[in-house]
Image (cartoon, grey):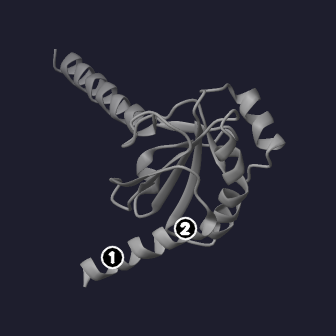
Amino acid sequence: MFKKLIFVSCGLAAAIAGFYLSLSLKSDFTTVEGQSYQWQDFEGQYLVVNYFAEWCAPCLKELPELNQFESFAKEQPDVSLLAVNFDNLGDPELQELKQKYQIDFRVISGLPENAVFHKPNSLPTTFIIGPDGALIKQLQGEQNNASLQNIITQLRQRHSLASS
């Protein structure tokens, strides 16, 4: 009887541990390149998330600016840029878009789960998420590299002043 109790207890403990492990390994989104992420992977960073569509002329016009911002972000330990396709295209179509418009930054495959932002009503829309994972800004309309860098600089300054 005692052996059965130990066996059942161990089995139950293993099942619970497996459940929590699977929850911790579940990704919130995957990029077109096949990388899986959880939102918590970006904790401590300013995350810039841009919604775009191919039929949106201002979206296409801002892509080179976002590529420049991506070059800046790659050099910053606390800044990341992601894009989401408004039309929820499949990976083959997203790969084509990335190639056609020379998109250098990560594009999320499908629509992200568990995000602190929602699918916008107009395009282009850019969300700025703070290092604590909270939504800081929702920017409507076309953005450029300089304005995005300026926003990040201002947010850093506010954060450092608040920390002092």
The amino acid beneath tag 1 is Arg
- Residue visible at 50% across and 37% down in the picture: 122
Distance from Cα at disc 2 to Cα at disc 1: 16 Å
Q: Tell me the crowding category of disc 2: few under 14, some 14 to 19, or many 20 or more residues within 10 angstroms, Cα based.
A: few
- The mark closer to the camera, 2 or 1, is 2
Of the 4 image quadrants, the one containing the N terminus is top left
Residue 34 place in picture, x, y as percent:
67, 38
Q: Residue, x 76% and y 37% (percent of image)? A: 97
Which residue bears the numbered disc 1?
A: 158
Give coordinates of residue 99: x percent, y percent. 82, 42
Drawn side of residue 155 relative to residue 143, left or right? left
Going by the numbered disc 2, the residue's amino acid type is Ser
Give the side of residue 162 with respect to residue 47, left or right.
left
Report the residue at 76% width, 42% height from top.
Answer: 98
> Residue 75's spot in the image, x, y percent?
63, 72
Q: Quadrant of residue 116?
A: top left
40, 143: nearer the viewer: 143
Helix, strand or loop for disc 1: helix
Q: Nearer the viewer, residue 141 or 94?
A: 141
Identify the residue under disc 2.
Answer: 147
Mark 1 crowd level (few <14, some 14–19, many ≥20, 10 Å Cα): few
Residue occupying image coordinates x 73% and y 57%: 64
Compared with 104, 87 (above or below) is: above
Q: Are marks 2 and 1 in contact (CB under 8 Å)?
A: no
